[in-house]
Image (cartoon, helix red, strand yellow):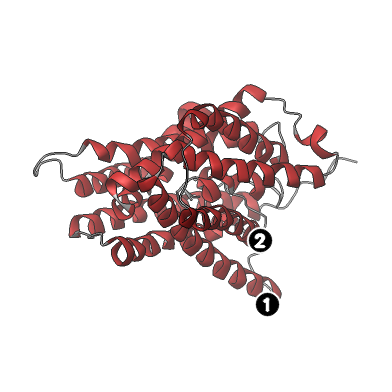
């Protein structure tokens, strides 16, 4: 909600279908800044536009809450059953949803499944499902609060990797934000006090995978439509997790099937509301509100699972979130001059 990377210029509102997948499936923050959608909006916002912006913000906060609930369900089921088995059931449900949406798209399944970068699309799908598995294991072993506090570093990893993967130029200010975020991670981990827990590697590894996934999403978006990326994300992930999930199938208690159904439904509900929010406002303008998921997760973790939020987690998490918000702000500033330039007229 696992999910949930600086924003890039918009392709279309439908781009949200491909970019909301990490949030709806991976236990992670709902917005993916590396693949966020933007639409050109006049500086003077009309009342109707402002109203849509307000409703989009409310939806984004609701999405963050839904994903926090989904993470709690993932932890509960992951504590009692094989992670591969639980994720496989989630992806089967998601794959059915993907196929249903593809069948309704222009051209149907034949058009949506046609990719110009099939290898990268498959790699994206496999990378995302691997990230989902790692996050669910982290929820069980490390807890919701600690996992999310470290996972919030993924937008900073996007900044660090956007140069070598996409060839983008990163200024010193955003590099400074990355360094500040790394300092926040060290505060959470407290490497100089006690024994460093190797389990902390899990959410950091998931953040790295999610960041690479977001960057690959931007890469394939240069040639494939959002619907194509959405389709391949679900299908490739479902096939990949089925290969390892089938050998780990086990009977599920009757009382846990309703929780499994809720897990699947929260993914779809959060995903649908996220798309609606993207249709009402720029995804980049909604990014700050995605961090409210960390608040909801902390509340759920403490109330439901009795987790403790130490001062080091609060301070370190605040530093990481602040660094992420700074990179978002710098990306918005960089786009502002381009949006303000009037379109050049074609020579007659």
Residue underneath mark 1: 47
Q: Indicate the position of residue 280 as horizontal and vertical percent values.
A: 67, 63
| Nearer-N-terminus badge (1/2) | 1
Q: Position of residue 100 (x, y in %)?
A: 75, 46
Residue in the picture at 35% in, 51% down: 148
Q: Position of residue 214 (x, y in %)?
A: 53, 39
Any part of residue 316 in sight: yes
Numbered disc 2: secondary structure:
helix
In the image: residue 297, left or right of residue 19 = left
Evaluate if marks 1 and 2 touch, with contact meaning CB atoms under 8 Å apart.
no
Q: Residue 184 got which mark?
A: none
Q: Quarter of the image holding residue 200? A: top left
How crowded is the residue under tag 1: few (<14 C-alpha within 10 Å), some, or many (20+)? few
Q: How many marks?
A: 2
Residue at 45% x, 32% y is 248
Label 2 environment density (alpha carbons within 10 Å; few <14, some 14–19, many ≥20): some
* Element assignment for label 1: helix
Of marks 1 and 2, the one in the foreground: 2
Farthest top residue in view: 119
Whether residue 146 sits left or right of residue 189 in the image: it is: right
Q: Nearer the viewer, residue 13 or 240?
A: 240
Vertical order, 307 against 222 (above or below): below
In the picture, which quadrant includes the C terminus? Answer: top right
> Eyeballing the image, is 126 above or below 330?
above
State whether residue 156 appears in this view.
no
Q: Residue at x 55, y 42 (%)?
A: 89
Q: Is residue 152 left or right of residue 44?
A: left
**Height in image: 289 above or below 193?**
below
Residue picked out by circle 2: 276
Q: CA distance from mark 1 to mark 2?
A: 19 Å
Residue at the image position 19 percent from the left and 59 percent from the top = 310
């Amino acid at each position: 909600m696992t999910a949930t990377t600086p924003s890039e210029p918009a392709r279309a509102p439908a781009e949200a279908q491909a970019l909301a997948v990490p949030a709806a499936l991976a236990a992670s923050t709902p917005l993916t800044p590396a693949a966020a959608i933007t639409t050109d909006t006049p500086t003077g916002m009309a009342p109707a536009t402002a109203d849509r912006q307000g409703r989009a913000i409310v939806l984004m906060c609701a999405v963050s809450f839904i994903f926090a609930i989904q993470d709690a369900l993932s932890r509960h089921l992951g504590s009692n059953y094989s992670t591969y088995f639980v994720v496989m059931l989630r992806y089967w449900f998601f794959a059915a949803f993907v196929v249903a949406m593809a069948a309704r798209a222009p051209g149907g399944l034949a058009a949506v499944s046609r990719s110009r970068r099939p290898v990268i699309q498959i790699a994206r799908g496999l990378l995302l499902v691997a990230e989902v598995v790692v996050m669910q294991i982290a929820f069980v072993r490390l807890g919701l609060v600690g996992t999310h506090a470290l996972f919030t570093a993924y937008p900073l990893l996007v900044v660090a990797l956007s140069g070598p993967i996409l060839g983008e130029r990163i200024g010193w200010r955003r590099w400074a934000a990355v360094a500040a975020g790394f300092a926040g991670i060290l505060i959470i981990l407290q490497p100089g006090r006690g024994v460093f827990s190797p389990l902390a590697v899990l959410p950091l590894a998931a953040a790295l995978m999610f960041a690479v996934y977001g960057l690959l999403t931007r890469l394939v978006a240069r040639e494939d439509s959002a619907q194509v990326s959405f389709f391949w994300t679900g299908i490739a992930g479902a096939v990949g997790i089925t290969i390892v999930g089938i050998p780990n199938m086990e009977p599920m208690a009757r009382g846990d099937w309703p929780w499994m159904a809720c897990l699947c439904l929260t993914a779809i509900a959060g995903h649908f509301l996220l798309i609606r929010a993207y249709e009402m406002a720029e995804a980049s303008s909604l990014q700050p509100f995605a961090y409210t998921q960390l608040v909801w997760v902390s509340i759920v973790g403490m109330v439901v699972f009795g987790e403790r939020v130490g001062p080091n987690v609060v301070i370190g998490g605040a530093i990481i979130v602040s660094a992420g918000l700074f990179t978002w702000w710098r990306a918005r500033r960089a786009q502002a001059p381009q949006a303000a330039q009037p379109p050049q007229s074609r020579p007659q």
